[in-house]
Amino acid sequence: MSKQDFYDTLGVDRGADEKALKSAYRKLAMKYHPDRNPGDNDAEARFKEVNEAYETLKDPQKRAAYDRFGHAAFENGGMGGGGAGFGAAGFSDIFEDIFGEMMGGGRSRRGAGGRERGADLRYNMEITLEEAYAGKTAQIRVPSSMTCEVCHGSGAKPGSEPVTCSTCGGAGRVRAASGFFSIERTCPACNGRGQTIEDPCTNCHGEGRVTQERSLSVNIPAGIEDGTRIRLAGEGEAGFRSGPAGDLYIFVSVKPHEFFQRDGSDLYCKVPISMVQAALGGHFEVATMDGAYTRVKVPEGTQSGRQFRLKGKGMPVLRQPQMGDLYIQIAVETPQNLSKRQRELLQEFEDISAHENSPQSTGFFSRMKEFFGGGD
């Protein structure tokens, strides 16, 4: 059966530039990689075809030869297996080969002697608004990988040491020859670490680290906001074989409060008052976040929705000396479940009220009638 055209294999036109070729290859390589399709022979064959097509077209000289002679340019000693060396590669190889330039060469986590940086960890912490106001020191327990105390992270049984990989000579990479060309991939014997362990530690089974739960102290600063991320350097997973540890990221969420709503460093509180208090004026006391009470004066004729500002009674500004404000919003409550006598009194008040007692409603309806031409 004749081979499919390389451009059709990648799904690009013949004038595709290097960026388009790489983008198409990334998608297809991720889709058909054997690690994502275990036991699927068709996907494995398709993966090899994609690699063969990309290896040819990404090289200007090979692409020029292919454009002129087609597949015949590589027969009798050409690419042959079409990148068969990738068939046994791990899923991490795809990230190294495809995204290498985006990740500092694709091997920045791995150092000499097979050492790898540990993974970063995430911990979700929920606190109250009061705790966000005052700040706190929280104790958390985090399950993570710790350096093995028996082998001190080497992975080798005490008294022995890791040895240089005989397959790659310690390089962590091997080259597979194919016709005129050679393909470099991660060493399958040491998984790219450059070393192997002949006598592994019985405590960590050669990993150099064990899973344990740790207790950590986390400082939550006053004024912290919902969604803030706190980084604890070096408190993530232990590195592989004495490699540097990753980081721990604490994601803080603040619980909704029963009385206060927060907007940055300002707080808002809706306070219901009676119709009589709004009409005659008066005062009430409102709690603030510091545990004290502040008196709020209600002027005569206060309308629903009016706000009163209590300066400096809001939330602390994170790592700053100033404080936000507390805004009290008035909600005038209409009387309910009236008795007969209460109804009579309100009706009597309505009958003797002049228009000046309710200027907003009177003015509103007057303007509406004038605008729409309504009658009396």
Image: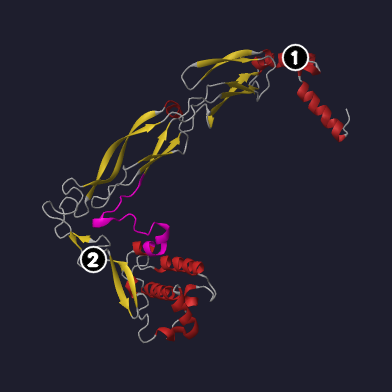
Q: Residue at x 48, y 68 (%)?
A: 24
Q: Residue at x 10, y 52 (%)?
A: 159
Could you tell me which quadrant the C terminus lies in? top right
Give the color scheme: rainbow, by chain, secondary structure or one colour: secondary structure
- Along the line of sight, which residue is nearer the eye, 12 or 267? 12
Residue 241 coordinates in the image, percent (x, y): 23, 52
Q: How many marks?
A: 2
Left or right of 288 in this view: 249: left
State yes or no: residue 97 in magenta: yes
Residue furthest out toward the front: 61
The residue at which mark 1 appears reads as 349
Q: Residues within 10 Å of mark 1 (few under 14, many from 20)?
A: few
Residue 329 sits in quarter: top right
> Which range is magenta?
95-121
Residue 223 coordinates in the image, percent (x, y): 46, 29
Residue furthest out toward the left: 159
Residue 114 coordinates in the image, percent (x, y): 25, 57
The residue at which mark 2 appears reads as 189
Residue 334 sits in quarter: top right
Residue 76 coordinates in the image, percent (x, y): 36, 87
SS label for mark 2:
loop
Q: Mark 1: which amino acid?
A: Phe
Tell me if I can see residue 146 in this picture.
yes
State yes or no: residue 364 in magenta: no
